[in-house]
Image (cartoon, rainbow, N blue to C red):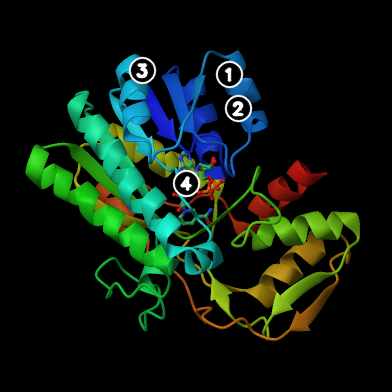
Amino acid sequence: MRALVTGGAGFVGSNLVDALIVGGCDVTVLDDLSTGREANLTGAVASGAELVTCDVFDAAAVRSAFEAANPDTVFHLAAQAQVSDSVADPDRDARVNVLGTISVLEAARLSGVERLVYVSTGGAMYGEAGVYPTPETALIRPESPYGASKFAAESYVSMYTDLHGLSTYTLRLANVYGPRQIPHSEGGVVAIFCERALLGKMSHINGDGEQTRDFVEVSDVVSALLAAGNSRVHGACNIGSGLETSINELVAAIDGLVDGGLEVDYRPARGGEVRRSVLDPSLALEDLGWQPTVALGDGLRGTLDHFR
Ligand SMILES: NC(=O)c1ccc[n+]([C@@H]2O[C@H](COP(=O)([O-])OP(=O)(O)OC[C@H]3O[C@@H](n4cnc5c(N)ncnc54)[C@H](O)[C@@H]3O)[C@@H](O)[C@H]2O)c1
């Protein structure tokens, strides 16, 4: 496979790049390094991966990166991925997530790419879904510009299959955690708690801690990405553990692994946060033969090891 990974210097993207390299693929990473880090690619670049530093919004630069790399498979992960930043600057959010996706789709179409996998979000699109675990058939009800821009991009991706015959698939991720997650990013609650526990610093919980999330380990997400890249099925599926974990349960699990070293305090709930979020991953098994394999305790152990 000749793969091009947008956002490949980021948390999920760099884990994917490493797996592609191990699988013997030629890999080009396209990333503007806004939240991604060159250091995440040290091993991959040493093994022959190429980093093109470029903004996905710059259609001409994206086009020439595609011409040079001539990929057969594209994994599109580059995104403005912070909900609060999307609320503060919806224009930039849409530029990166919608127009950036269009420039990647156009480059893919014009350079004869065989398969494009788009990485979307579950929680931010379904909002307060009312059905748990939430299936793909649930009403799409974004509660932020981020959720809306990811959904708009999904529609473009799917439409390119109908209009241009480009083979595409979308993965709607739950809350991903694991090595290389940035410990100060908004959705990075696992990384934040792990890092602070190891530093002996207090962690903060917004609200009563009974809000729930679906935590899926990054190596499971990488195997879903690889399965979607190798398949030719069209559509979109959830990628999550299917298990609902409260923030209080997460704290207890991490605390148990650091011998009582995770101290927390409770702060006022943040407005606009969904109370429950858990995805039904059964379509992923049907479409891609994928199921989650990493239990939360094992994944947390690996994440703590990364921060040690
Ligand atoms: N981490 C999660 O829990 C989660 C959940 C749902 C969906 N996602 C999606 O997964 C993808 C990867 O997220 P992540 O958690 O690895 O975040 P990340 O911030 O680590 O990765 C995003 C990458 O995209 C790059 N990027 C941002 N804007 C760019 C631009 N204009 N041009 C080129 N590159 C740009 C960043 O530098 C970074 O390397 C995103 O599309 C995100 O929406 C992540």
Residue 45 tag number: 1
Q: Would residue 1 appear left or right of 275 to someone viewing this image?
A: left
**Residue under circle 2?**
41
Mark 4 or mark 1, which has the lower sequence index?
Answer: 1
Distance from disc 4 to disc 1, alpha carbons, whole Å, reads: 22 Å
Q: Amino acid at mark 1?
A: Val
Q: Amino acid at mark 2?
A: Leu
The quarter of the displayed image where residue 30 is located: top left
How far across and how far down the image is residue 75, in percent? Answer: 37, 36
Please say if the residues under marks 3 and 1 sit with CB atoms less than 8 Å apart: no
Please say if the residues under marks 1 and 2 sit with CB atoms less than 8 Å apart: yes
Q: Between 295 and 127, which is closer to the camera in this rendering?
A: 127
Is the CB of the residue bearing disc 2 within 8 angstroms of ligand 1? no
Distance from disc 3 to disc 2, alpha carbons, whole Å, reads: 17 Å
**Residue under circle 4?**
221
Mark 3 or mark 4, which has the lower sequence index?
Answer: 3
Distance from disc 3 to disc 4, alpha carbons, whole Å, reads: 25 Å
Q: Between 32 and 138, which is closer to the camera in this rendering?
A: 32
Q: Is residue 108 visible?
A: yes
Q: Would residue 114 appear left or right of 126 to someone viewing this image?
A: left
- Disc 2: CA contacts within 10 A as few (<14), some (14-19) or many (>=20): many
**Does 137 sit above or below residue 168?**
below
Quadrant location, the C terminus: top right
How far across and how far down the image is residue 61, in percent? Answer: 37, 27
Residue 20 tag number: none
Q: Would residue 119 appear left or right of 170 to someone viewing this image?
A: right
Mark 4 vs mark 1, foreground winner is 1
Distance from disc 1 to disc 2, alpha carbons, whole Å, reads: 6 Å
Q: Amino acid at mark 3?
A: Ala
Please say if the residues under marks 4 and 2 sit with CB atoms less than 8 Å apart: no
